[in-house]
Amino acid sequence: MISIVIPAFNEEERIKGTLKKLLEFDSKYKRLKEIIVVNNGSTDATQTILMGYSKKVKLINLPVNLEKGGGIRAGIMAAKGDNVLFVDADNPVAVEKILEVENKLKTSDIVIGRKVKIKPFSPVRFVLGKSFVLIVNILFNLDIWDVLTGFKGFRKDVAVDLFKDLKFRCWIFDLEILIKAKQRGYKIDKVDVEWRYDNLSKLRPLRDSIKIFMAVMKLRSSLHEIK
């Protein structure tokens, strides 16, 4: 069975909708070992809301924000399922895709969501996203379809191996994980997903692209530390 890990930082407006869909999915398919929500140093009502789900959801409270990578790492290390899937708190992918991820993890070590359709479509997001994937594939020789997608599944032992010594907790933790995965010979597969952005999305394409690019360069200069 599969553990779902959700990193949550100030998600009071979105987390209830995501949990509702996941709990309905589990009621129908009975495939979830657990739902783990990592309250990543939230300063809004996220923790209070999550306490209302204490009988159905495993809650990890981090006193300070450890960035997205640090929050996901905390959830993965606590997971009890044979497989683990991390998803964004706004639930941008249809929950039924969990079944496809779990099926592909029978023959692969890692399964990555590949965005084949984005709603609402944004030319800026599209161009920046494709450019980023092209750049990192050239810089790191990865041949990966979608690097930063917040929908990635792992066999539990593989997830622990890749996350236990995480060096980059910011946006590019995904890139560090994928570099390690390639170095260690793990088999990577994909599932095609329709990605839905809502009007509460925290990503600001132009501003955040600069931050991500700078972080990529820092990671590039630290490659010797990633093994």
Image: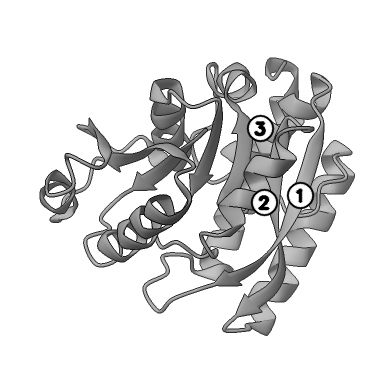
Q: Which mark is residue 100?
A: 2
Q: Amino acid at mark 2?
A: Glu
At 49% from the left and 42% from the top, the residue drawn is 31
Tell me where residue 93 sits by quadrant: bottom right
Left or right position of 21 against 176: left
Gap between marks 1 and 3 measured at Cα: 18 Å
At 53% from the left and 17% from the top, the residue drawn is 164
Gap between marks 3 and 2 measured at Cα: 25 Å
Q: Earlier in the sequence, mark 1 or mark 3?
A: 3
The secondary element bearing badge 3 is classed as helix
Seen in the picture, residue 182 relative to 211 is either above or below; the reply is above
Left or right position of 151 against 132: left
Horizontal and vertical percent for residue 16? 26, 61
At 45% from the left and 61% from the top, the residue drawn is 91
Q: Amino acid at mark 3?
A: Glu
Q: On the image, numbered disc 1 is attached to which residue?
A: 190
Could you classify mark 3 by the number of other residues whose Cα lies within 10 Å: few (under 14), some (14-19), or many (20 or more)? many
Q: On the image, numbered disc 3 is attached to which residue?
A: 176
Horizontal and vertical percent for residue 224? 75, 17
Pair 3/2: label in front:
2
Horizontal and vertical percent for residue 161? 61, 17
Q: Nearer the viewer, residue 126 or 216?
A: 126
Could you classify mark 1 by the number of other residues whose Cα lies within 10 Å: few (under 14), some (14-19), or many (20 or more)? many
Tell me where residue 28 sits by quadrant: bottom left
